[in-house]
Image (cartoon, rainbow, N blue to C red):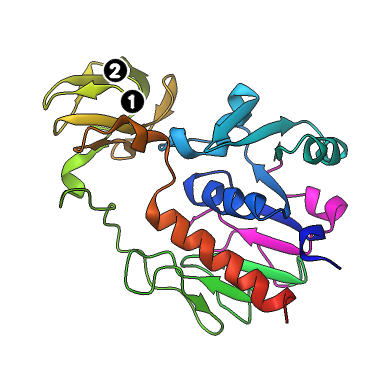
Amino acid sequence: MRLTELVVLIKGGGEVASAVAHRLFRAHFRVCLTEISHPIAVTRGVTFAEAVYDGEKEIEGVVAELVKSPSEIPSVWEKNKLPIIVDPEVKTRDILRPDILVDAIMAKRNLGTKITDAPLVIGLGPGFQAGKDVHLVVETNNSESLGKLIFEGEAEKDSGVPIPIMGLTFERVLHAPQGGLFLANKDIGEVVTAGEVVAKIGTREVKAPIGGVIRALIRSGIRVEKGVKLGEIDPTGNIAYCYAIRAKMRAIAGGVLEAILTRFNA
């Protein structure tokens, strides 16, 4: 079998899953994403999960298209697009019979992935045991081991520290001051000043902690719980960064590609 004939099923449509899907699709693998019916993405500029709401989502030249049933997947591949399907139970696996399954849900725990799900099963980040739950784990922590393949054992525990930009981490992140309906009056790509109101939850205002461009923000109209991450401010002010895959995600995607080549290019 040629490598480009391999079918890859990716669980998740968030930022990490999207970066992996983008890399593998560019490398001409036949890739399909599965998602839940109402995904909550923060970095919406670079998440294929947005196709669940809008029908399509483009990231750096690759277009994901929402399909209603697995039977539509081959036709989307023929259009040189990336299929994404609402399938929280991943029943698509039984129809596609993928050569590779990548769990990119990033739940920090295994939600049901088994090493028998495909000839090669890859888990991203903590929560998976290489050699038991999955064949390989790819390190996702923002450390010196980022993107490293783990053949035995587990990934590092998530540090919980946001990706630093100009030395700022927690200082640039928006969190929900209370639970309730999130209503945004700003959007991704807009420039804000420190203290400017970005959204409201009930009667509480959500203000920009620093000045810069809104790099990430969840969809307006979603109910949230107190303390959840709502968005990020990029102090560089570069709007193009809102729609570019981050270096960390590219490193993880590179690890997945290496894992596939290690298994199938022997």
Q: Quadrant of the C terminus?
A: bottom right
Examine the rendered structure and indicate whether residue 16 appears above or below residue 154.
above
Which residues make up the magenta segment?
Answer: 86-115
Residue 127, how many percent across, how many down?
A: 50, 68
**Whether residue 27 is visible:** yes
Q: In this view, does 137 lie above or below 8?
A: below
Task: State the residue at coordinates (13%, 33%).
Answer: 210
Q: Which of marks 2 and 1 is in front?
A: 1
Residue 104 part of the magenta-drawn span: yes
Left or right: where 107 falls relative to 240: right
Q: Residue at x 82, y 66 (%)?
A: 2
What is the number of callouts on the image? 2
The image shows residue 198 at horizontal and vertical percentages of 25, 21
User: Quick one: label 2 or label 1, which is nearer the N terminus?
Assistant: 1
Q: Nearer the viewer, residue 61 or 90?
A: 61
Q: How far apart are marks 2 and 1 (CA)?
A: 24 Å
On screen, 100 above or below 57? below
- In the shown orientation, is residue 171 left or right of residue 33? left
- What amino acid is found at the position of numbered circle 2 in the picture? Gly
Q: Can you identify the residue that label 2 sits on?
A: 202
Q: Which amino acid does label 1 sit on?
A: Gly
Q: Is residue 11 visible?
A: no
* SS at circle 2: loop
| Residue 16 % position (x, y) | 49, 51
Residue 110's place in the image compared with 33, above or below, is: below
Q: Main secondary structure of the magenta part?
A: loop
Read off the residue under disc 1. 189
Task: Pinpoint residue 204: horizontal percent, then vertical percent.
Answer: 21, 20
Any magenta on residue 113?
yes
The local secondary structure at tag 1 comes to loop
